[in-house]
Amino acid sequence: MEKIDFLALAKEAAKIADDKKAENTVILDVMDLTAIANYFVIATAESTPQINAICGEIEKSFKEKGVTVLRREGVNSDSWRVIDYGGLVIHVMSPNVRQTYNLENLWKDAKTVQTDTVEVLKVQAAEKVKEYTEKLSKIVAEEKKKIAKSAKKISKKISKTAAKKVSEAKGKIKKGIKTAKEKVKKAKRTVKAVGKGIEAFSKTLVKKSAPKKVKAKTKAKSKVKSKAKKTVKKKK
C-alpha cells in the first residue's frame, strides 16, 4: 500500500477550506504530542451550509486520490464537523464552538504549519499593500495639488482685494486733499473779499470826515480875521 502524505493532504484540505471562504484556517503538527494523528486542520465556517460545503469538497477531492475516510463525527451537527483520515483529522467549526473549545490552546505545544495558501496570501497582501500605497500616494499628491491650487487662488483673490482696498483708500485720500484745497482757496477768496470790503469802507469814512475838517478850519480862520478887525477898530 502506498504511503499517504498526510502533510500534503493537510495543506490541500486547508486550501479547499480557504477556497470555500473559511476563516482562520490553521494546520497543527501534533505528531510529537499524540498518537491519534499527525496533523489537525482547524477551520471556521459561518453557517451549516458552509460547513457542509467545505467537508463535502474535502471528502470528494480526497476520494478522487483514493484516500478513504476512517471516521466522521458531527454529521448531524450544525456547528462542528470532524473528518478523520487517520494521520489527519479535520475540524470545521462554527465561530462560537471554536471559541468555546479553543483547540489551538488545548494543543498549544503543537507547531503551526505554514501552508502554500498562507504564503500566497502573504504575497497577495504585500501586493495589495503596495497597490494601496501607490493609490494613496497618488491621492495625496492630487490633494496636495488641489490644496496648492486653492491656496494660490485664495492668495490671488486676497491680493486683488487688498489692491482694490488700497486703490480705494488712495482715491479717498486724493479726493480729501482736493476738497481741502478747494476749501482753502474758497477761504482765501473770502478773506480777500472781506479785506477789500474793509478797505472800501475805510475809504468811505475818510471821504466823509474830510469836508467837516475843512469847514472847521475855514470857520476858525473867519473868527480869527473877525477878531483881528475888531481889535484894529478899537485902536483907531
Image (cartoon, helix red, strand yellow):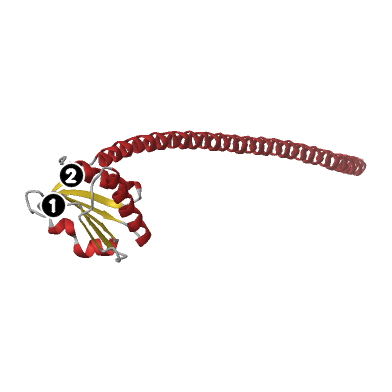
Q: Quadrant of residue 50?
A: bottom left
Front residue (pair 121, 228): 121
Front residue (pair 142, 161): 142
Give SS at disc 1. Answer: loop
Q: Residue at x 93, y 42 (%)?
A: 233
Tell me the crowding category of disc 1: few under 14, some 14 to 19, or many 20 or more residues within 10 angstroms, Cα based.
Answer: some
Q: Residue at x 30, y 52 (%)?
A: 23
Residue wearing tag 2: 6
Is residue 108 left or right of 235 when viewed as pictured? left
State the image coordinates of residue 171 (x, y, percent, origin top left).
Answer: 66, 36
Farthest front residue? 1
Front residue (pair 133, 56): 56
Give SS at disc 2. Answer: helix
Q: Quadrant of the N terminus?
A: top left
Q: Quadrant of residue 107?
A: bottom left
Tell me the crowding category of disc 2: few under 14, some 14 to 19, or many 20 or more residues within 10 angstroms, Cα based.
Answer: some
- Report the Cα–Cα distance between label 2 and label 1: 9 Å
State the image coordinates of residue 102 (x, y, percent, origin top left).
Answer: 19, 60
- Give, as a three-letter code, the residue at label 1: Ala
State the image coordinates of residue 79 (x, y, percent, origin top left).
Answer: 29, 64
State the image coordinates of residue 158 (x, y, percent, origin top left).
Answer: 55, 38
- Give, as a three-letter code, the residue at label 2: Phe
Residue wearing tag 1: 37
Q: Quadrant of the C terminus?
A: top right
Say which mark, if any, is on residue 82. none
In primary-sequence order, the first of circles 2 and 1 is 2
Are the two marked residues, 2 and 1, in contact with CB atoms closer than 8 angstroms? yes
